[in-house]
């Protein structure tokens, strides 16, 4: 049986081939500010766990359709996330090549963008909508 993740991967691959600038490779980063490094037997102040997948900036669907209780603010954008082995969570960081909101580029390549809201599409744990800033 075909999974939701496999269907999403095929769809994203098809779009990536047809519309080359629509899908960006992205890093999902979980940052912890303090943790105990058992191998070094000391506390470290910053630790990053990275995962790679794809992001599509959503320009057609209103964020209020996905997050009816959330009012999207200036500089915030709805995105579609796919291909990550880590489940995106609020407070994680998303980094990708460029973010265009409206007609202005609000983020330089490689800027860290905060994930403000996340919704698991179909409850499958493999494709997500997120609001980022």
Image (spheres, rainbow, N blue to C red):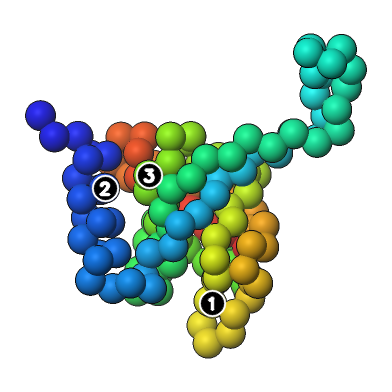
Camera sees residue 68: no
Residue appearing at x 58%, y 85% in the figure: 104
The label on residue 101 is 1
Q: Position of residue 73 (x, y in %)?
A: 61, 69
Q: Which of marks 1 and 3 is in front?
A: 3
Q: Where is residue 60 in the image (x, y as percent from the top left)?
A: 35, 74
Secondary structure beneath dot 2 equals helix
Position of 7 with respect to 114 (left or right) is: left
The label on residue 25 is none
The label on residue 9 is 2
Above or below, 42 against 29 in this view is above
The label on residue 83 is 3
| Residue 61 image-quadrant placement | bottom left
Distance of label 3 from label 2 (alpha carbons): 7 Å
Residue furthest out toward the left: 1
Secondary structure beneath dot 1 equals strand
Using a 10 Å C-alpha cutoff, classify the residue at mark 1 as few (fewer than 14 neighbours), some (14 to 19) or many (20 or more). Answer: some
Q: Which of marks 1 and 2 is in front?
A: 2
Residue appearing at x 38%, y 73% in the figure: 21
The N terminus is located in which quarter? top left
Secondary structure beneath dot 3 equals loop
Q: Earlier in the sequence, mark 3 or mark 2?
A: 2
Observer-nearest of 103 and 53: 53
| Callout 3–callout 2 Cβ contact below 8 Å | yes
Distance of label 1 from label 3 (alpha carbons): 23 Å
Q: Earlier in the sequence, mark 1 or mark 2?
A: 2
| Residue 54 image-quadrant placement | bottom left
| Callout 1–callout 3 Cβ contact below 8 Å | no
């Amino acid at each position: 049986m075909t999974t939701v993740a496999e269907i999403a991967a095929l769809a994203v691959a098809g779009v990536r081939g047809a519309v080359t600038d629509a899908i960006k490779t992205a890093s999902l980063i979980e940052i912890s500010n303090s943790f105990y490094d058992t191998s070094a037997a000391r506390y470290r102040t910053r630790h990053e766990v990275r995962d790679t997948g794809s992001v599509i900036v959503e320009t057609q669907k209103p964020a209020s359709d996905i997050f009816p209780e959330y009012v999207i603010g200036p500089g915030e954008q709805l995105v579609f996330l796919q291909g990550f082995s880590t489940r995106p969570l609020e407070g994680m960081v998303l980094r990708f090549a460029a973010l265009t909101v409206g007609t202005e580029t609000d983020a330089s390549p490689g800027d860290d963008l905060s994930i403000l809201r996340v919704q698991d599409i179909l409850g499958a744990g493999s494709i997500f909508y997120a609001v980022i800033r």
